Structure formats: structure tokens, C-alpha cells
Image (spheres, rainbow, N blue to C red):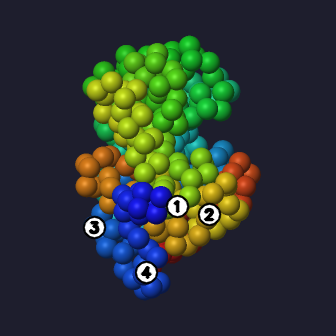
């Protein structure tokens, strides 16, 4: 049993057990400064939340911080100022996976889709994501989501289109998978109660399940991350060390295997406490004030 456990741990990424705090920081710095494929761009300043109006000034301030470290960003919405983010990102030489946030309000959905199409027609979307975890939240039916996906695909024939959801949804919902040009899979070992020792192995399994479901389509990991503070979720323990460990292991594996991965998230955002509990505030690589947390 011990030999099997040792083998699993050897496959699970960097072993932090014998490293000092300074060595852990150095390991983070090496991965971070090598440059990431992608970061999920979180625009909300302290006191803001979805529905708040995002200013060009605050977008540029955050873009100044992240631009040296990432090739791509992923956005989540095309309303309330979020539709400005992709054009600004392109000014910085950053590619964009542009999302339209869909929910139960059809009037908001209509505006999101219209703005997504405008952003793409202006040349600022390298990939478009129609909806985020809509099936997981049960905000729309499959037919409703598919109608939005087909609308976007028809109006943007030259832009790769996908839908973002948990990795297992693509096996469970083949009609949605078939409609995608690219599979946009969220892979969170944390939210499935996985011990940090096995989180990389678990995420690899998530990814390869999406690969099988995609049947030859490209799979992009659109979210993965680990909070550095908050309440444990099953065997998943938030901590400074665990957050660094998941960051290093996920990004190093993705680079080695040439997997496109967007890390969640850029900045801490307090509003997420309402939907995720106390861990919701602590997913950022930078804190709410724009300070790198693991330097």
C-alpha cells in the first residue's frame, strides 16, 4: 500500500513536504514569471458585484498588472462595461476568450448575446463562450441554450464558439457538445472535495473525460483554482501552501502537455462570498488591492 501511495504522490506534481517557505515562494515565482497561457479576468473593485458598472479606468488599471504574465484572458459578461475588456486586452497584445453571461432573465440574455456579437464583429474576440455553467445552475433548458449557441455560430462563422460548464456536463449533454466548436471545461478538484495531494491527478482525469466527450474537438480548461483562505470543502483545505501548490502543478502540467488553461482567478473579489461562502473571496493570484499574494 505504501509503494502505491508513493507512486501516486510522485505523479501528483511538486512535493512541498520538504520545502521551506522561501523555497515554496521561489517555486511559485519560477512558474509565474515563465508566463501563463490564460487568466480569468475579474474586473470588480471592492464594493462592486455583477450588475455594477465597470469603468475603462479600472479595466486598464488591472490590465496593467496582469499583462506581463499572461497570453490570454477570459471574460464572463458583455454588459455593464464588461464589453470593453476584450478591446482593451487586444491593445495590450492579449488574446481573448469572450463570454456572454446567460441566466433566467431573457432581456439580459438578449443584450449579452447582441454585445458578444458586436465585440466579435469588431475583431476583439478570438474565441467566444456562450453561457457559463447554465446547465449546472439549471437557469435554461438545453433547447434554450442551444438556440443562443446556434444564433452566435450563425452570425460569427469565423470565430470558434463553445459553451462553458463543468467537465462532466459534456458527457451528459451530447447535443450541447456537438454544437460546440471547442469544449470549454471547468475543472475544480477543490469543489469535489479532493485532497491537495491528489488534486493534479484528479484534474487530469477531469480533463481526459472532457476529451473523450469531445470526440476529437479541442478542449480548453476554462477554470481551475484553489482558495488560500476559508472553510474546508470535504478533504479540500484552503491554505497559502495549497493554493501555491495547485497553481504550480496545474500550470506546469498544462505547459508540459500543451493544454490551454485559464487560471481562476486574477484578483480576489469579496462579492463571491454570497454564492460560495467564505472561500469565495480568496481565489485571486492578486489580492483585492492588486498585490501579488504569493511574492
Residue 180, placed above or below residue 10: above
Residue position marked by numbered label 4 in the rendering: 18
Residue position marked by numbered label 2 in the rendering: 237
Question: Residue 34: which disc?
Answer: 3
Badges 1 and 2: C-beta atoms under 8 Å apart? yes
Q: Nearer the viewer, mark 2 or mark 3?
A: 2
Does residue 218 appear in this view? yes
Gap between marks 1 and 2, in whole Å? 7 Å
- Please indicate whether residue 224 sits to the left or right of residue 141 in the image: left
- Please indicate whether residue 90 sits to the left or right of residue 226 in the image: left
> In terms of secondary structure, where does tag 1 sit?
helix
Q: Nearer the viewer, residue 91 or 49?
A: 49
Residue 238, placed above or below residue 50: below
Gap between marks 4 and 2, in whole Å? 19 Å
Residue 258 place in picture, x, y as percent:
25, 48
Residue position marked by numbered label 1 in the rendering: 196
Q: Nearer the viewer, residue 242 or 164?
A: 242
Gap between marks 3 and 4, in whole Å? 23 Å
Q: Name the residue: 32% across, 52% down.
A: 254
Question: Residue 44: which disc?
Answer: none
Mark 4 neighbour class, 10 Å CA radius: few under 14, some 14 to 19, many 20 or more: few
Mark 2 neighbour class, 10 Å CA radius: few under 14, some 14 to 19, many 20 or more: many
Amino acid at each position: 500500500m505504501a509503494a502505491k501511495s508513493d507512486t501516486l504522490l510522485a505523479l501528483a506534481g511538486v512535493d512541498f513536504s520538504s520545502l521551506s517557505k522561501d523555497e515554496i515562494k521561489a517555486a511559485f515565482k519560477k512558474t509565474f514569471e515563465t508566463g501563463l497561457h490564460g487568466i480569468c479576468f475579474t474586473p470588480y473593485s471592492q464594493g462592486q458585484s455583477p450588475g455594477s458598472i465597470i469603468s475603462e479606468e479600472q479595466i486598464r488599471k488591472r490590465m496593467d498588472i496582469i499583462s506581463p504574465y499572461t497570453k490570454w484572458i477570459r471574460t464572463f459578461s458583455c454588459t455593464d462595461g464588461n464589453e470593453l475588456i476584450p478591446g482593451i486586452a487586444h491593445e495590450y497584445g492579449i488574446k481573448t476568450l469572450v463570454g456572454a453571461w446567460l441566466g433566467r432573465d431573457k432581456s439580459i440574455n438578449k443584450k449579452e448575446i447582441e454585445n458578444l456579437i458586436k465585440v466579435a464583429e469588431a475583431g476583439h474576440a478570438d474565441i467566444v463562450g456562450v453561457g457559463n455553467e447554465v446547465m449546472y445552475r439549471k437557469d435554461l433548458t438545453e433547447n434554450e441554450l442551444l438556440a443562443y449557441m446556434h444564433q452566435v455560430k450563425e452570425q460569427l462563422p469565423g470565430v470558434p464558439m463553445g459553451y462553458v460548464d463543468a467537465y462532466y456536463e459534456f458527457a451528459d449533454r451530447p447535443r450541447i457538445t456537438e454544437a460546440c466548436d471547442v469544449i470549454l471545461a471547468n475543472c475544480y478538484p477543490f469543489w469535489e472535495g479532493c485532497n491537495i495531494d491528489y488534486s493534479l491527478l484528479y484534474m487530469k482525469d477531469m480533463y481526459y473525460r472532457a476529451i473523450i466527450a469531445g470526440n476529437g474537438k479541442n478542449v480548453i480548461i476554462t477554470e481551475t483554482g484553489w482558495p488560500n483562505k476559508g472553510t474546508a470543502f470535504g478533504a479540500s483545505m484552503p491554505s497559502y501552501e495549497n493554493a501555491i501548490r495547485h497553481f504550480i502543478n496545474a500550470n506546469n502540467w498544462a505547459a508540459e502537455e500543451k493544454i490551454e488553461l485559464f487560471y481562476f482567478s486574477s484578483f480576489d473579489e469579496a462579492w463571491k462570498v454570497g454564492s460560495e461562502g467564505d472561500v469565495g473571496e480568496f481565489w485571486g493570484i492578486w489580492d483585492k488591492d492588486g498585490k501579488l499574494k504569493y511574492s
